[in-house]
């Protein structure tokens, strides 16, 4: 090595040339510290170092026919052989100028040269690392910056990649709740059970249509069943969501046949749990399964595919096969969306000073939200300025949180009777007791309303209903002192 000028940290030597480091030459930045452990020798090739006046940085002009010092290769194609025993140094305030450390640092050169070097500057420091072997640039500061910042880039981008990939994993299994309110294709497992001689697909469809009609479900109903000529996934091709009487099962038919459900089907047409196994003749994607008891026409020693209404994985439709002598239910689904409203009686009691109809609406919304029912909720309550029938909007079937059918529409709700008592709270649990209504059987306000639901006086009364009744007493059964307490009816909009 030829040295002109003193060698001290942060000084600018006139020229430096380093050879025999990793069988290649490297130019050091003008502010580099030369370790006392370096091997200093004079070049033998006659090269003359010169200084560039514009930059003050040394450059080297190779002597003609300099076979020992070939021109620097293109960094885009240069390949360094990594030294496995050496761990590349991470950015730090100290470094070593040993040849092995130099080799380890050079392994990341291709990444840094093309991305970060032009934009980042590293201040001179007495502990900067030696630069990698030959690079096709004569700007030492850019080379030094490359070595330092490229290591930071690898560390900074690697960790977030692992985190961002892992984070969504828990959320890939959807957890749906009671968001059935609104328009849905309804699905249930039939209370009717049958042997394998169902009578083919037509016989299964007849079972579904009969059970739906008995529960006042409108529209056309089909069985989720396959035979050798027709697959279940070709019979059910819906773009709208599919729900049981409490929860969303799938967002559409494609979601239905993807191998998993959002919730169990489990409920029958009466809104109760009971039968769990259903004939399906289908594989997990809804395609035809060869086990179908001779197209559901005979009872013999053959086998038939069935599903479990308590499954949310592929077992809901493909739980294996069983002997055709077995007796199972069938899955039934409506071919057109059915508008569904859910109604419940609050689990909580409230004094006569509810705060008015608007405050009662808030109580209903909060109760529904706490139970994860979703949607918008309003109270069936009247005051001197609002009739209960005008405070709510009903345009389809009404069911309890237990799945019991209540009424087919608004007119049916206010005709003096309902199909089932409103004994379920927001959690689907049975309750009892009086309910504040301030309303007569036609949905119109009565004068007894605890001074528009602001009084708790024992001398002021409010109209109440009986949640255990299905006649007109459900909405008006008499009056009670406002010093007492009562529940509130809530219905989804």
Image (spheres, grey):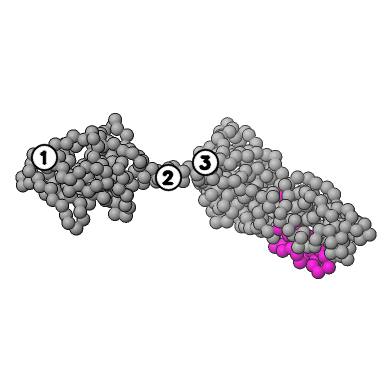
Q: Residues within 10 Å of mark 2 (few under 14, many from 20)?
A: few
Q: Residue at x 76, y 49 (%)?
A: 425
371 to the left or right of 12: right
Residue closest to the far right:
459
Q: Mark 1 points at which residue?
A: 43
Q: Residue at x 53, y 49 (%)?
A: 255
Task: Using the rendered image of the protein, determine whether residue 272 is visible from the camera's viewpoint.
Answer: yes
Lower position in the chain sequence, tag 3 or tag 2:
2
Callout 1: 10 Å neighbours few (<14), some, many (20+)? few
Please name the residue that numbered disc 3 is placed on. Answer: 283
Q: Assess whether residue 396 is covered by the magenta stretch.
A: yes
Earlier along the polypeptide chain: callout 3 or callout 1? 1
Q: Magenta part of the protein: which range?
A: 377-401
Question: Along the horizontal axis of the image, is 388 left or right of 255?
Answer: right
Identify which residue is drawn at 38% across, 43% down: 155
Distance between the alpha carbons at the discs numbered 3 and 1 = 79 Å
Helix, strand, or loop for circle 1? Answer: loop
Residue at image coords 79%, 55%: 488
Q: Which mark is residue 161?
A: 2
* 160 or 388: nearer the viewer: 160
Q: Is residue 55 left or right of residue 177?
A: left
């Amino acid at each position: 090595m030829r040295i002109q000028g003193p060698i001290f940290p942060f000084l600018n030597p006139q020229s430096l040339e380093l050879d025999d480091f990793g069988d290649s030459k490297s130019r050091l930045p003008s502010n580099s510290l030369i370790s006392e452990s370096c091997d200093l020798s004079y070049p033998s090739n006659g090269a003359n170092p010169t200084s560039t006046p514009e930059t003050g940085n040394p450059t080297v002009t190779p002597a003609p026919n300099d076979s020992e010092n070939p021109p620097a290769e293109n960094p885009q194609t240069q390949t360094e052989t990594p030294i496995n025993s050496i761990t590349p140094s991470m950015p730090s305030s100290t470094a070593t100028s040993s040849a092995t450390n130099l080799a380890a640092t050079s392994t990341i050169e291709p990444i840094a040269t093309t991305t970060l070097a032009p934009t980042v500057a590293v201040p001179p420091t007495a502990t900067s690392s030696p630069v990698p072997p030959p690079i096709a640039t004569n700007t030492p500061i850019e080379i030094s910056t490359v070595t330092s910042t490229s290591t930071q880039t690898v560390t900074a981008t690697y960790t977030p990649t692992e985190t961002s990939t892992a984070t969504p994993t828990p959320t890939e299994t959807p957890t749906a709740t009671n968001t059935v309110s609104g328009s849905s294709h309804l699905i249930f497992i039939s209370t009717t059970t049958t042997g394998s001689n169902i009578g083919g697909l037509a016989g299964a469809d007849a079972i579904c249509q009969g059970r739906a009609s008995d529960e006042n479900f409108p529209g056309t109903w089909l069985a989720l069943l396959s035979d050798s000529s027709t697959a279940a996934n070709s019979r059910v091709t819906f773009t709208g969501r599919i729900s049981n009487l409490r929860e969303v099962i799938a967002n559409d038919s494609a979601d239905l046949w993807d191998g998993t459900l959002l919730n169990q089907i489990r409920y029958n047409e009466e809104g109760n749990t009971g039968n769990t196994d259903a004939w399906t003749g289908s594989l997990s994607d809804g395609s035809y399964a060869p086990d179908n008891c001779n197209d559901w026409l005979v009872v013999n020693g053959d086998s038939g595919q069935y599903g479990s209404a308590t499954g949310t994985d592929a077992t809901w439709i493909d739980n294996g096969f069983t002997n055709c002598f077995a007796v199972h239910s069938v899955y039934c689904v409506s071919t057109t969306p059915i508008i569904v409203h859910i109604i419940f009686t609050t689990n909580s009691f409230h004094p006569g000073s509810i705060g008015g109809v608007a405050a009662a609406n808030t109580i209903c919304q909060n109760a529904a939200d706490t139970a994860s029912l979703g949607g918008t909720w309003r109270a069936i309550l009247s005051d001197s300025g609002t009739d209960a029938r005008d405070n709510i909007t009903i345009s389809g079937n009404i069911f309890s949180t237990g799945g019991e059918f209540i009424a087919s529409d608004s007119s049916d709700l206010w005709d003096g009777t309902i199909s089932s008592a409103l004994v379920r709270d927001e959690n689907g649990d049975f309750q009892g007791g009086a309910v504040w209504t301030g309303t007569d059987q036609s949905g119109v306000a009565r004068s007894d309303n605890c001074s528009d639901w602001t009084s708790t006086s024992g001398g002021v009364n409010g109209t109440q209903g009986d949640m255990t009744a299905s006649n007109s007493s459900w909405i008006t059964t008499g009056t009670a002192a406002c010093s007492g307490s009562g529940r509130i009816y809530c219905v989804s909009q």
